């Protein structure tokens, strides 16, 4: 098992970034993820916080990773896909920030590109920091709306992308059970940011290995049924 962790979208968007992504896809294990921080698609937030990644740079980086790694490996998963990081609660945020984020994600989805996962976080302002002082003077809309905005991204972006990357009927081998909850048994592969597959209404001993067939999707996971034990 050989996976990477984070990637700099500016480097990935460069011509050399495409060459490096191809090497990663060639020599690492399938199901690999290159998470990249766009933080915000809103140009006002980008300028206010001196962020270095613009939407145009991010899309080019996503295209490079897809070109290098979207082909599926022997276990059915794409070799290497991008991951995206978004942050709400940054200075300059307005209600338009959320609209800009949804439009940016929709553009990637409409282009037919693949993405492994998306993390949506709310900046935490610790007392005594400049961000906390700014929040007292300029309350940001995400203070109230973050849960509903995150739900928008979950169902408008994350779930359709899960359906594209892990289509119904896809057989995913080499899984192991690692958690049993009220919803069933949770399975995953080894690796960074491995997809989680839930076998509903099942209680399988932890550490069991097996193959699952994808049967359904949710924003943060997929559902499956066991079809065979891994050899």
Image (spheres, helix red, strand yellow):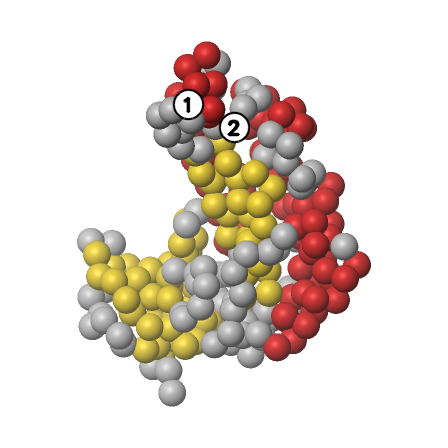
Q: Which residue is labeled 2 in the image?
A: 90
Q: Residues within 10 Å of mark 2 (few under 14, many from 20)?
A: many
- Image quadrant holding the C terminus, namely bottom left
Residue 86 in the image: x percent, y percent? 53, 39
Residue located 39% across and 60% down the image: 196
Left or right of 107, for residue 178: left
Check the image and report above or below for 171 versus 146. below
Label 1: element kind: helix
Residue 161 in the image: x percent, y percent? 54, 50
Label 2: element kind: loop
Residue located 47% across and 40% down the image: 120
Left or right of 20, for residue 144: left
Residue located 21% across and 56% down the image: 181
Q: Residues within 10 Å of mark 1 (few under 14, many from 20)?
A: some
Q: Which residue is labeled 1 in the image?
A: 132
Residue 127 in the image: x percent, y percent? 35, 25
Residue 194 appears anywhere in the view: yes
Check the image and report above or below for 144 versus 101. above
Check the image and report above or below for 97 versus 176. above
The residue lying toward the viewer, choosing from 52 and 40, is: 52
Check the image and report above or below for 31 versus 57. below
Left or right of 165, for residue 110: right
Q: Residue 192: which numbered mark, if any?
A: none
Q: Tell which circle, 1 or 2, labels the residue nearer the N-terminal end.
A: 2
Residue located 40% across and 70% down the image: 189
Residue 170 in the image: x percent, y percent? 49, 68
Left or right of 82, for residue 217: left
The residue lying toward the viewer, choosing from 218 and 97, is: 97
Question: Hey, which quadrant is residue 200 in on the image?
Answer: bottom left
The residue lying toward the viewer, choosing from 9 and 222, is: 9
């Amino acid at each position: 098992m050989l996976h990477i962790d984070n990637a700099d979208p500016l480097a990935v968007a460069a011509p050399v970034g495409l060459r490096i992504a191809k090497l990663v896809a060639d020599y690492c294990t399938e199901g690999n993820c290159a998470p990249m921080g766009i933080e915000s698609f809103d140009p006002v937030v980008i300028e206010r916080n001196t962020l270095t990644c613009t939407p145009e740079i991010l899309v080019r980086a996503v295209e490079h990773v897809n070109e290098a790694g979207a082909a599926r490996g022997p276990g059915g998963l794409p070799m290497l896909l991008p991951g995206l990081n978004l942050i709400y609660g940054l200075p300059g945020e307005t209600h338009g920030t959320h609209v800009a984020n949804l439009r940016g994600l929709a553009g990637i989805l409409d282009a037919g590109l693949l993405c492994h996962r998306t993390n949506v976080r709310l900046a935490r302002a610790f007392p005594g920091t400049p961000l906390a002082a700014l929040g007292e003077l300029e309350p940001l809309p995400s203070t109230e709306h973050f849960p509903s905005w995150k739900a928008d991204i979950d169902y408008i972006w994350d779930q359709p992308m899960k359906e594209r990357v892990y289509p119904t009927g896809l057989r995913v081998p080499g899984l192991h059970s690692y958690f049993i909850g009220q919803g069933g048994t949770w399975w995953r592969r080894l690796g960074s940011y491995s997809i989680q597959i839930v076998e509903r209404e099942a209680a399988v001993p932890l550490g069991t290995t097996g193959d699952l067939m994808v049967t359904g999707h949710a924003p943060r996971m997929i559902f499956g049924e066991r079809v065979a034990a891994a050899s």
